Image: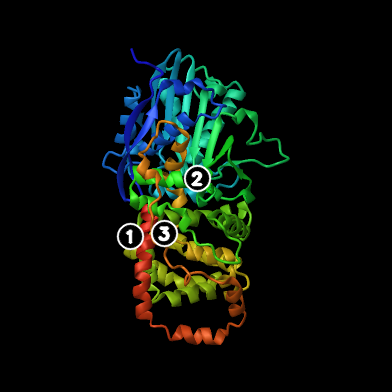
Amino acid sequence: MKNEDEVKEYRFWTYEFSLKENVELPVYYADHFFKKPSTEMNNDLMAFALGLELSSGLEAEDRSSSVLKLLREIGCDNARVNDAFNQETTIYSTDVAIGSKQWKSYTIIFVVLNGAHYNNEAAANVMLGASGNHAGFMIACNAGLDELRSFIKDENITGKTKILITGYSRTAAGANLLAAYISDAIAARRVKQRIGDIKLTKKDCYGFSFETPLCGHYELGKKMVPPTDSRYDNIWYVTNPDDPVTYVPTKNYNFVRYGHHYLIDSHNEEKKARMLANARYYFGEKTAKKVDMSKFKKVPLTGVQYPSDIFDGYLARFFSTLGTRNHYHEYIESDFVRFVYVMFDSPDLALTILMNAGDPISLLKALHSYSDDKEKFDEHFRPLIESSTESHGYGKDSESILNAFYQIAHLVRGYFKDGIASIVTDKYIVSATVNMRILIMSHLPSMTYCYIIQECPYYQIPAEFLEPVKEEAPDDSAKLIDSAKLIESVKSIDSAKIIESVKSIDTAKAVESVKSVVTDIKDNVTKRLSKDD
């Protein structure tokens, strides 16, 4: 007979973006993790939920093999995945794994929404919808709900039930929305009608979401249940303050997250050091170097100390230029959705557009010159976009990509209303530019894993990994920017001289230089990570 109090180590495989390969990681589980009610902080179950989620993010011919193996090893003999796991991805697809096991008088159901590794489903991230919850994230929510309902029916599950829901990034939003939907059903005593013929209470529904974007909808003053209402006390959403994904889409459109906020204390030096130690041990030195946020360069006089300062300031200002949610939905959304989908599906297309433009300087000048006149913009860029998309087999999407380019140029122009001077003196842009390679690192699942497991006693590493690796401090003095001098320099900019300077640029060398940069960008798009220096 199994000892329910025995905590066992299980191994799973997941794709690690910093290494561009699958890695094997440990996760610890025991049924007694479910003794605590869902309304209490449960570090052990949270760490398991993260490991279970990461196991769904495998790069392999059979992408479901790792998550199914883990579910079956913990006792879910009936574990299965939805059709999406074995099909080509689309805007509307979400991988879902599910399984159940018996524990005492309970059936425990595990629902896993794969957001740890996905592809062009990312286009749904910019599909906000006209009103209500984020439409794109509701796709993930509904995929999980559909699979949960059919699983309960197919397995003839009745009686006392516990449910664990987990997701990461895009599907963290889906998991948060799904947990909120179930919590609403519990509060309304409509579980049978909305979920299945089971007995489910709030304390037995566990919602965990990691690096969670804003996803639900709440307007103060209207007859709506606030996201912090006690009915959602069973939901825990995790964010790293330095993760850009957790700042979008925008609070300006009344988007929210439900439940308790678990904030990763990534600005705490002791926790940061332990995260790096975990990274060295579980992923290797290469990953540890990539997630080392101490490399973030603080530009003097800007007041920007952390990536979170950039995201707080820049994104708030950027979204203010976007207009209302209704304007975005009516005039921008559909083109952005197709644009993101195509770019994820064919990352070489961006390079082709750049090369067909002749040179990067010409492209930038044209984008700026025509961004306030849609008719002239279309006249100038249509031949370029049509020839580029046709060469990659996306001719039918040329109009959407053309419109998306215009909207991006228009947004940038709106952000920098004062022209060139405001671009080079904007403290957020300056800080982002010198830290470009490190800004996305806080969204890596490996970093989240290395923070979350700190709170569990089972993830012990050898003492030698706790010692920081000594490196010679690089001379960054030449890279630091004196903002005061910069601003003074910008004030004296002679536009005529700038134009003359641009004309004298060796475009052949410029194109060759940009090719290497765009190759990095392409890799960023496909793997969400830039190459090593």
Q: Is residue 450 left or right of 488 when viewed as pictured? A: left
Q: Is residue 502 above or below residue 273?
A: below
Please name the amino acid that badge 2 sits on: Glu
Spatial CA span between label 1 and label 2: 51 Å
Q: Is residue 256 left or right of 290 when viewed as pictured? A: right
The residue pinned by badge 1 equals 393
Mark 2, other Cα within 10 Å: few <14 / some 14–19 / many ≥20 = few
Can you tell which quarter of the image residue 339 is in?
A: bottom left
Foreground: 20 or 380? 20
Q: Is residue 475 above or below residue 152?
A: below
Q: Are marks 3 and 2 in contact (CB under 8 Å)?
A: no
Tell me the number on the disc at residue 241.
none
Tell me the number on the disc at residue 270.
2
Foreground: 158 or 309? 309
Spatial CA span between label 3 and label 2: 49 Å
Q: Find numbered disc 1 in the image and state the secondary structure of the residue it sits on.
A: loop
Work out which quarter of the rendered image holds the C terminus and state it. Answer: bottom left
Dot placed on the residue nearer the N-terminal end, 3 or 2: 2
Q: Position of residue 106 (x, y in %)?
A: 45, 16
Tell me the number on the disc at residue 397.
3
Foreground: 18 or 272? 272
Q: Position of residue 206 (x, y in %)?
A: 51, 28
Foreground: 9 or 511? 9
Q: Position of residue 495 (x, y in %)?
A: 56, 84
Please name the amino acid that badge 3 sits on: Asp
Dot placed on the residue nearer the N-terminal end, 1 or 2: 2
Please name the amino acid that badge 1 sits on: Gly
Q: Is there any visible trace of residue 439 in the rendered image?
A: no
Q: Are marks 3 and 1 in contact (CB under 8 Å)?
A: no
Report the residue at 56% width, 72% height from top.
Answer: 482
Q: Nearer the viewer, mark 1 or mark 2?
A: 2
